[in-house]
Amino acid sequence: MRVLRFDLERPELEYYFHELYQAFDPGVKNILSGAAEGVLSQKNEENNVILSLTWEDGKTLTRAYQFKNNDEPLENSIYKGFLYDLLSEYFNKQLEWGTLTGIRPVKMAQNYVKLGWSPTKIRNKFREDYRVSNDRSDLLIQIAKKQADFIPGELECGVQQRISLYVGIPLCPSKCDYCSFVSTIIDKKGENLQCYFDHLLVEIEKTGEILRTGDLRIDTLYIGGGTPTVLSASQLDTLMSALEECFDLSHLREYTLEAGRPETINREKLEVAKAHGVERICLNPQSMNPQTLLSVGRPWEAGLIEKQVALIQSFGFKTLNMDLIVGLGNETQDDFLRSLEAVIALEPENITIHNLSIKKGSRIKDQNGIVVKEGYGEDFYQAVKSRLSGEGFEPYYLYRLKYTRDNSENIGYAKPGHEGIYNILMMAECQSTIGIGAGATGNLYDPITNNITKVFTVKDVKTYNERFEEIVEKKGHAYHKHYRG
């Protein structure tokens, strides 16, 4: 791994510079002192920011960027913009997302829309202050406007009428190499699953008691994982019955069940889901190419995806979502496009396109470190977007992660009327989400300050089971304080 030393007059810029530098040259380790193969320096002289980048085996580039007196003290975003200009020239490379490295760029566009800004003013803001391309700016504006119809108004948020529930089942039959979630592999006898399940039912009951108040309304319910369909049909029925008993679900706008691994789905489980009002099923092939799946440790069986899709569709669920990941294994862009065509042919109402992100906790990261391959290029991105648009799919939510192929984004596409409301609300951060179970973070929204307070919990099943009473008491106290004072 190459090492780059930051010689910064303002050391507090390290985090911002590191994030942006990784987007241009991923996998480089940065330090603040000591020997290194490269040096990135920053200093201010009068009305200039002087930036310089040198690598022992490459060129040196030094530039002075002028700022106005009234820009003092300079915001971090201004320094980041100057660094972008330096790196763009050094690497002869433009980033579609410019200096933006955060997860939720749509939220920025939403704020500008609320201010009444025109699309032209928003586009200019993104381009001039953040170096974002017009294409991505227009995408953000498009998604922000689409999401407006699904986000509760200020008055509703003000009285905290609507909240969402997330129930986590962080267990899987096996772990895929790209997965960074702290998911537990079910033991042969299923003892860890049963113990977790028993505790989960208790947490549901205790959380329901705290939230049983007249001014709250459950807006969306999402049972996620891991792989929730590792539960038996009987367990799934018990879980959903407990949720109905402990919470008022009569006002749900959306009820989602993740069934990501096709081998965990059967008719009995789908009958239970349908009987309890589930409307949205997520089945995630990730790729339709068997060589790719086997190379990343994901089981594959010929014809299974097609068989399970047909079974799901026979029940008449409102929405079927299917996920694909760009950059798995050694796939080429043609390999991915073949997967996309195969999924489109199955006629789901919702398709989510993820870009492979090298994250801590995944086998890929442990084995190879942060090695981010070059992307397939902007033509590929536009081809995917155009193909989905031609089939009636529109982008409805977007988020970004670090260390993704081509510094790209994850986009949810849906046919009108099949947008994932829970996904929209999570990215907009305009509503509280109550997290139940291991790894289920709660987000408590304060409409007055427009801030989110996180209610963290342990991520792994073993710790959750061992410290169950302590964990549930701590989470319960946070929810009680927020809603009952």
Image: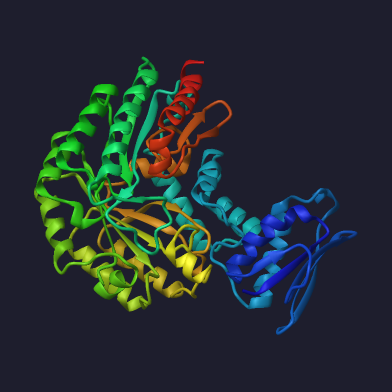
Left or right, residue 137 beside residue 230: right
Which one is in front, 141 or 313? 313
Left or right, residue 75 beside residue 423: right
Residue 372 appears in the figure: yes
Left or right, residue 194 beside residue 53: left
Q: Position of residue 408 (x, y in %)?
A: 48, 64
Q: Residue at x 47, y 57 (%)?
A: 361
Numbered-mark total: 0
Q: Position of residue 368 (x, y in %)?
A: 49, 71
Instruction: Work out whether 8 lies above or below 122.
Output: below
Residue 285 location, quadrant: bottom left
Residue 243 location, quadrant: top left
Identify the coloring. Answer: rainbow
Q: Residue at x 78, y 51 (%)?
A: 74
Q: Position of residue 346 (x, y in %)?
A: 17, 61
Q: Residue at x 41, y 32 (%)?
A: 468
Q: Position of residue 24 (x, y in %)?
A: 60, 70
Q: Residue at x 51, y 45 (%)?
A: 107
Left or right, residue 215 beside residue 260: right
Which one is in front, 155 or 429? 429
Instruction: Work out whether 204 lies above or below 336.
Output: above
Which one is in front, 146 or 481? 481
Q: Residue furthest right?
A: 46
Residue 385 appears in the figure: no
The N terminus is located in which quarter?
A: bottom right
Which one is in front, 159 or 324? 324
